[in-house]
Amino acid sequence: MAKMPRAPADRATLKDKDKGGDLSAKEDEVVEERVNLRPLAVYEVIRREGVEELQRPFVSLWWSGIAAGLSIGFSIVAEGALHAHLPEAGWRGLVESLGYSVGFLIVILGRYQLFTEITLTAVLPVLAEPSRGSFLALLRIWGVVLAANLVGTALFGAMLASGLFLPQDHQEGILAIARDLATLSPFEALWRGILGGWLVATVVWLLPSAEHSRFAVIMLLTAMISALELSHVISGSVEVFLLLFSGELVAGAALGILLPLLAGNVIGGSALFALLAYGQVKEEMAEPGASREAAAP
């Protein structure tokens, strides 16, 4: 059985191959177009994107991550505005959940660096060709993007807490949404974070096959996070920082929410979804006759 080549340990070896194992020439063209893809081709699209992300400069990752942290705040703003204006009814939660998709639409379609999205995209190249260099690059991108996202959400949370930017009724709606998150125990935050991370990873996995319906895929799946009362560490940190800067939450309690959310999102998006995504194509990638050509520098 043919063995996949292993990447050398230095960062330059993160340059990966242009053709996935067992992909025909026609399928390889389809990978580039991102339409009508079978699982191996979907994997190859995301893997190539992950290789590119792992090599991006620190400054690019940092500013893109801050932009994502700021932009994801509009999920809470839109959801809070709907909460404030919709009447008390059993269907209100479902409708206001559509507002939760706004920030994700901005971040994903804008190609900003979002931590929970990176937990799948950057993991697949490392699973395909593990090495010390690729693992260190993975830790680097996770650390930079997570820190930048939290800086962005902290800034956004501080702006919301100031009360200067939105009408009072919108402010109350946002606070009502945020207070619900603050009631979670660490155990509840962990389990809800696992399912939330799974859904975000699902968005990443579906996008290569949904080139002409990206808006609908992102909107429906991210709205489910809110509708099912699941949790997402980056959007959730906007709510946590809002309560923290408003004096309704202390730092210890904030960490007691964010750390389980972070662990849950990583488990759901990386440990579970990424491993299953890799497992379903591993044997196809290693079949005899698999052709993998080196990419040009």
Image: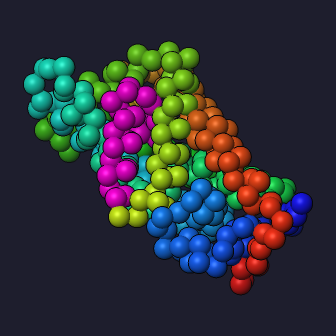
Does the magenta-highlighted stretch encompass residue 216?
yes
Does the magenta-highlighted stretch encompass residue 51?
no
Which quadrant is the N terminus positioned in? Answer: bottom right
Say above or below: 272 vs 66. above
Question: Which of these two is toward me, 125 or 72?
Answer: 125
Residue drawn 32% across the image and 56% down it:
215
From which residue to which does the magenta span run?
213-237
Question: Which of these two is toward me, 65 or 83?
Answer: 83
Say above or below: 65 vs 147. below
Q: Is residue 201 in view from this perspective?
A: yes
Residue drawn 49% across the image and 26% down it:
192
Does residue 222 appear to the left or right of 273 in the view shown?
left
Does residue 281 appear to the left or right of 169 in the view shown?
right
Provide the major secondary structure of the magenta segment.
helix
Say above or below: 296 vs 128. below
Residue drawn 78% across the image and 69% down it:
290
